[in-house]
Amino acid sequence: GYTVLLGSSELQPDREKSSIEALLRQRVDGLILSPLQGSDADMSHLSLISQNQVPLVLLEKVANVAANVVDIRNEGAAFEAVSYLIGLGHRRIAYYSGPDYSMHNRERLTGYRRAMMEHGLPTSASGVRQAGVYLADGYAAAKAQFSGSGERPTAVFCFNDLVAIGVMNALMEGGIFVILVLFLFVAELRTALIVVASLPITFLATFIVMGWAGISSNLMSLGGLAFSVGM
């Protein structure tokens, strides 16, 4: 049998590098890595893995790094989620974007834009709002947008679940109550498995963006965040 060795970077690049070096010293038979990325991230330590001829599987694509990747179909999943929101009657749909360096973000943004364009809806620059990856990022982005007096979107599609939770916290602080709908998309079935609702004063249909890497490429789990204001 095999012995499984686990390491956590705790979101610290130096710790990720030292963990990889320690595992290589243990002559591991392979590595599964969810790499830290950033606009100024130094990914050179990944070359140590190939130099040691150790098989590598990544849980997210890294630019200029050749490796097997286990991932969801980000563009297609985003397209399905935004199309679902459009099917509910939403026309002003915003995307709360992740960081520019993230391949996931780029692919989800492409899926968002493709869904809007194929349904004849505008994809103006104001429809894409820079959020980030953390709960606080979603909270700040939503506070900035929904505290203003400008035209609000009737639906929001979020980069990930933490951003979506931050958005919901900001909305509920502002007196906007939430209905949560969590969907599991399996291949072409796209079946809604779970619906959790709270009684709203102002109606919200909430659809949280989540992604899990399944064992099969046909298994895709995705959420989104949608809401209607003033109904």
Image: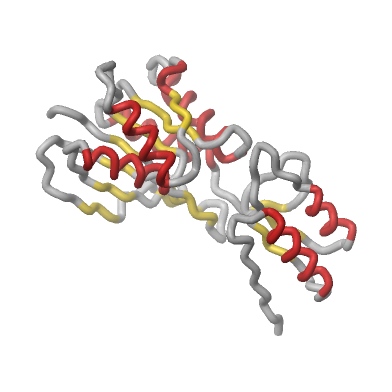
Q: Picture coordinates of residue 215 (x, y %)?
A: 56, 61
Which residue is painted at 33% across and 40% down in the image? 167
Q: Which quadrant of the structure image shows residue 41? A: top right
Looking at the image, the residue that sits furthest to the bottom is 1
Which residue is painted at 79% across and 73% down in the image? 28
Q: Establish if 187 lies above or below 88.
A: below
Instruction: Name the one closer to the observer, 134 or 209.
Output: 134
Q: Establish if 32 lies above or below 180.
A: below
Quadrant housing the C terminus: top left
Instruction: Name the one closer to the observer, 174 or 115.
Output: 174
Which residue is painted at 71% across and 57% down in the image? 14
Which residue is painted at 67% across and 59% down in the image? 33
Q: Which quadrant of the structure image shows residue 1? A: bottom right
Q: Picture coordinates of residue 116 (x, y %)?
A: 42, 22
Residue 130 visible in the shown view: yes
User: Does 165 sit left or right of 231 as displayed?
Assistant: right
User: Does 147 sit left or right of 42 as displayed?
Assistant: left
User: Does 33 sit left or right of 150 as displayed?
Assistant: right
Residue 75 visible in the shown view: no
Q: Picture coordinates of residue 230 (x, y %)?
A: 14, 27
Instruction: Name the one closer to the observer, 188 or 106.
Output: 106
